[in-house]
Image (cartoon, rainbow, N blue to C red):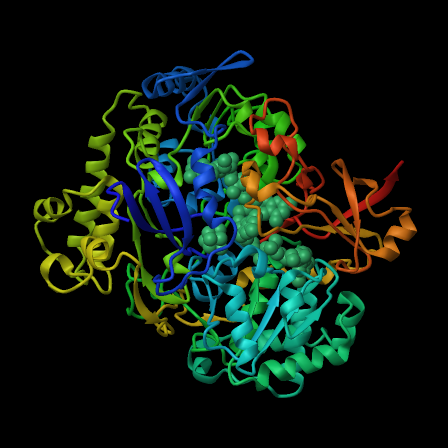
Amino acid sequence: MTDEQTQTHFRTCPLCEATCGLEITTKGDQVVRIRGDRNDPVSKGFICPKGSTLKQLHEDPDRLTGPMIRDGETWREATWDEAFAEIERRLSPLLEEHGHQALGVVLGNPNVHNLGGALFLRHVIKAAATTNIFSASTVDQMPKHVSAGAMWGDPSLFPLPDLDRTDYMLMLGANPYVSNGSLVTVPDFPGKLEAIQARGGKVVVVDPRVSRTAQSASEHLFIKPGTDIVWLLSLIHVLFAEDLVDLGHAAQWVNGVDDVRALAERYTPEMAESVCGIKAEVTVRVARELAAAPTAAVYGRIGAHTVTFGTLTSWATDVLNVLTGNFDRPGGVMFCSSPTTKLGGTPGGRGFKTGRWQGRASGRGEVLGELPASTLAQEIETEGEGQIRALVVIACNPVRSFPNSDRLDAAMADLDLLVAVDPYINATSRHAHVILPPLSALERSHYDMTFERTMIRVFAKYSPAVFATSRPDEPEILTRLALVLGGQGAHASAEDAHVAALTQLVEREVASDSSPIAGRDVAEILEMLGAWSWAEQIVDFRLRVGRFGDGFGANPHGLTLKQLVEDFPHGRDYGELVQRFPEATKTTSGQVDLFPEIVANDIDRLLAADFDSDGLVLVGRRHLRSCNTWMHNVDVLVKGKERCTLQVHPSDAETHGLSHGGTAVVSSAVGEVRAPVEVTQDVMPGVVSLPFGWGYDSPGIEMNVARSRPGVNSNALTDDQPLDEPSGTSVLNAIPVAVASVS
Ligand SMILES: Nc1nc2c(c(=O)[nH]1)N[C@H]1C(S)=C(S)[C@@H](COP(=O)(O)OP(=O)(O)OC[C@H]3O[C@@H](n4cnc5c(=O)[nH]c(N)nc54)[C@H](O)[C@@H]3O)O[C@H]1N2
Ligand SMILES: Nc1nc2c(c(=O)[nH]1)N[C@H]1C(S)=C(S)[C@@H](COP(=O)(O)OP(=O)(O)OC[C@H]3O[C@@H](n4cnc5c(=O)[nH]c(N)nc54)[C@H](O)[C@@H]3O)O[C@H]1N2
Ligand code: SF4
Ligand SMILES: [Mo]
């Protein structure tokens, strides 16, 4: 067809960590079709059912397209100038009277899927000038940051299971057939797991449910929720007891092996059997298989991290990777070597510290500059100097995604100022005084600054915006917000602020001796970035000074953003990850520390833990057609069978008088919900499961499709008191609950 208006666009799906390539066909301002981009060198056409719904999200009549200001119980549409002026009007007296500690900032998951969030949030955090910073990290991956920081000194350098080359994958608390992977970016994760098995390898899944991933694995082991740490230590025990430890090339740059051996001594497979419910002979066999496999990778995620011993569990997975010689080697776990990463250097650095300051009310220490999400309500409620009175919530729905959410709901309603940067009026933003909506994914450009760092191949891809718009993008919204928070006012020039920040970035780079643009003229570099939009200027800059970059002319055929646009619309694949250690070690000793202080300090808590409860415990789950707390407003994703069910094993259903299709009341230490019962062998006895992210029937939520199938909010049941201590992460799995039938 030669219709001039029909266009094909290639872009990265920004909805989850898999970052699949999409082929989007448009006609004028309409999306005609979205399908997987078969020419994307990494995703090769793979997508999930969410990928094509960028169209529905863009067209959703409930999606806000202009700022909203609260007028008593109703909303009024406002201009951007009015919205920022309103924030300033409410905020100024608060800051004047109480200082910046009266301000809190809450950052949610979609920020990492969004170039504006990834690059411009730092301005908001800096301008807020408060220690009251919270994010979804402490309901998610903070244990991994802490164990990585403690072991090799870099909290953001994640071990990535090398799925393309591994022979053996041991996976705990992850369900990538549904989630499509997390803290490792793998389009078509299911296909990769099947390929491991097809080439004669093995995939072992450890989960208290027979998840979709467990169904397709070579072997599935039920584990009592929250006990993974004990099981992992028993695997380590067997490796030492049977003399199977072989660090391989890591032997020269790892210390602390003897401390690990001493700790693991008490964790016999028999002890693990009584705590975790995995038979001793199975544990011994798995340990032997791990050691014998030519290559192997141990990987844990949400179910293994959001538990009482999340950091220790994360640490123990990587101890296994080290002890079996699979750390930083092909087929084992490898590390980011993305286009914007600087490789090389020498081992050793400043190390990693937590607890540099404490939450005023909670007394909990910071981790990576953040306070625990579980303490947000307390910091709002507790009166006195430094009480949070104003909150800026960016791409987060804490009233659904943080624990003990009913408490948080009440606290939010009591704020003097709540600003939400969000496209919907949902459980959280309904309490806002001002809502600033971002552009839809089709209206903005994208380069995956975050997930290029977790990808199992080295890859660069740029997605131009599909539709042009004159509305402000998130870089502009966040920059203006930063200017208001910082006291420069609603009318300060965002353009000037961006130019100043970009200039600083360039100045720092030319001042670095190891940079390809060391000593160059700052004005000349800025001039070369000139034509791009703000976010793209930063991307172009980072690519050009990065490992494949053109060095602004120093390496004429090197990578630039222009080159990606013109020559690589499907993305440029630079191949497999390269080895990064020992150079990547940033501990003060310059060695990878197998038994770091942060871990040692948490061992007494582990030794004192009582794993003996025999009541029911609740775990979460995700569904392929969901995305955390916000995509249930897409009709094609929510239609069909009821998904927000309480899964119960037949034996427990019988004990508690529950019947399939009936309703159960589920209660915990903090709350109660009523949910439809699904009796199934897919959960282990003693475990019940509710999905996460539902609950759309609260007054004021304006998401009409979701409201018609509201489901229940599982975070009404999760307790905000227990934490994974080293990381401040909430305990979202293995929650003690009681169930009863509602007649
Ligand atoms: N019980 C329990 N609780 C959990 C979990 C669990 O497994 N069980 N999982 C946890 C995990 S892993 C995470 S990451 C968190 C996620 O929870 P949150 O961090 O709250 O993230 P989301 O629910 O993905 O989205 C938050 C908000 O971002 C908005 N949004 C979507 N796109 C954009 C955008 O482009 N820009 C802006 N500004 N806003 C946007 C959505 O409308 C939504 O209101 O929940 C955690 N909570
Ligand atoms: N479709 C879809 N995809 C998503 C999301 C989504 O909401 N929907 N959310 C995205 C986000 S923000 C994240 S962080 C990732 C998360 O991705 P995953 O980490 O893969 O998360 P889940 O799919 O929740 O799988 C967690 C598994 O842990 C199990 N589990 C619970 N408790 C325990 C335990 O104590 N021990 C063990 N061994 N297992 C346990 C659960 O039964 C569940 O099968 O998914 C991302 N992708
Ligand atoms: S798997 Fe994730 S990135 Fe791929 S299409 Fe689905 S939502 Fe998008
Ligand atoms: Mo997450």
- In the figure, is residue 646 to the left or right of 650? left
- In the figure, is residue 569 to the left or right of 660? left
Q: Relative to 434, does residue 33 appear above or below in the rendering?
A: below
Q: Position of residue 87 (x, y in %)?
A: 40, 20
Q: Position of residue 21 (x, y in %)?
A: 38, 56
Q: Relative to 672, does residue 323 appear above or below in the rendering?
A: below
Quadrant of residue 220 in the image?
bottom right
- In the figure, is residue 203 to the left or right of 272? left
Number of marks present in the image shown: 0
Q: Position of residue 546 (x, y in %)?
A: 24, 60
Nearer the observer, 50 or 535: 50
Q: Relative to 393, does residue 314 appear above or below in the rendering?
A: below
Q: Position of residue 360 (x, y in %)?
A: 54, 34
At a point 66% along the width and 87% down the height, the residue shown is: 242
Q: Relative to 730, does residue 265 appear above or below in the rendering?
A: below
Is residue 139 among what the camera can see? no
Nearer the observer, 541 or 270: 541
At a point 76% along the width and 58% down the height, the residue shown is: 683
Nearer the observer, 422 or 149: 422
At a point 61% along the width and 63% down the height, the residue shown is: 313
At a point 39% along the width and 68% down the height, the residue shown is: 585
